[in-house]
Image: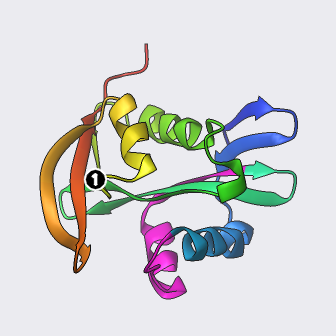
Amino acid sequence: MEETEKSSGSVIREYVSSDFWDVSFLNQISYLSPEPDEVLRVKISTGKVWVWSAGMMVLGAIIVCPDLDKLWIWSLTVARAYQNQGWGNQLMQTAEDFYTNQTLWLHTSPTGPANHLYTKRDWRTSQYLKNFYGKGMDAVEMYKALRPVA
């Protein structure tokens, strides 16, 4: 299992089944309309997941899942107290490094803070989706064609 260490005691590593309840909690507190645990379990079982852990606690996660003919970042979460410290960026880098020579896709709020992260990482907007998250809650679909790591 590959691990990326950013600071003492904190690592980005592959998900293991004992991480489920921490990842579920992060999803519950990070989204206005979080998916139920049954959906989360399916996404985890059909996709690839990395977590950022500090000691025994999972404080961030990225879930990448295939859907039809595309690979989607289904979820990127970092505990609020640890946002804007580079962990979301590091989780994104881990997924991008794994999926070289492929294209990743995601949906995000056009005005949310994550949109800035994606734009800074050279993600491109594919389309604007009116009411995607519900009435009055629009989204943008974004993609990034990944190159081999040099």
Element type at marker 1? loop
Residue 87 image position (x, y, % from top left): 62, 41
100 relative to 58 in the view: left or right:
left
Q: Verify whether residue 32 appears in magenta.
A: yes
Q: Verify whether residue 84 appears in magenta.
A: no
Residue 148 image position (x, y, % from top left): 36, 22
Q: Which residue is mark 1?
A: 110
Q: Residue flagged by tag 1: what amino acid is it?
A: Pro
* Colour option used: rainbow
Residue 95 image position (x, y, % from top left): 47, 42
Quarter of the image with the C terminus is: top left
Dot 1 surroundings within 10 Å: few (below 14), some, or many (20 or more)?
some
Query: Which segment did they paint magenta?
Result: 31-52
Q: Nearer the viewer, residue 90 or 103?
A: 90
Quarter of the image with the N terminus is: top right
- Residue appearing at x 43%, y 20% in the figure: 149
Q: Nearer the viewer, residue 117 or 59?
A: 117
- Residue appearing at x 24%, y 61% in the figure: 139
- Residue appearing at x 24%, y 47% in the figure: 142
23 relative to 119 in the view: left or right:
right
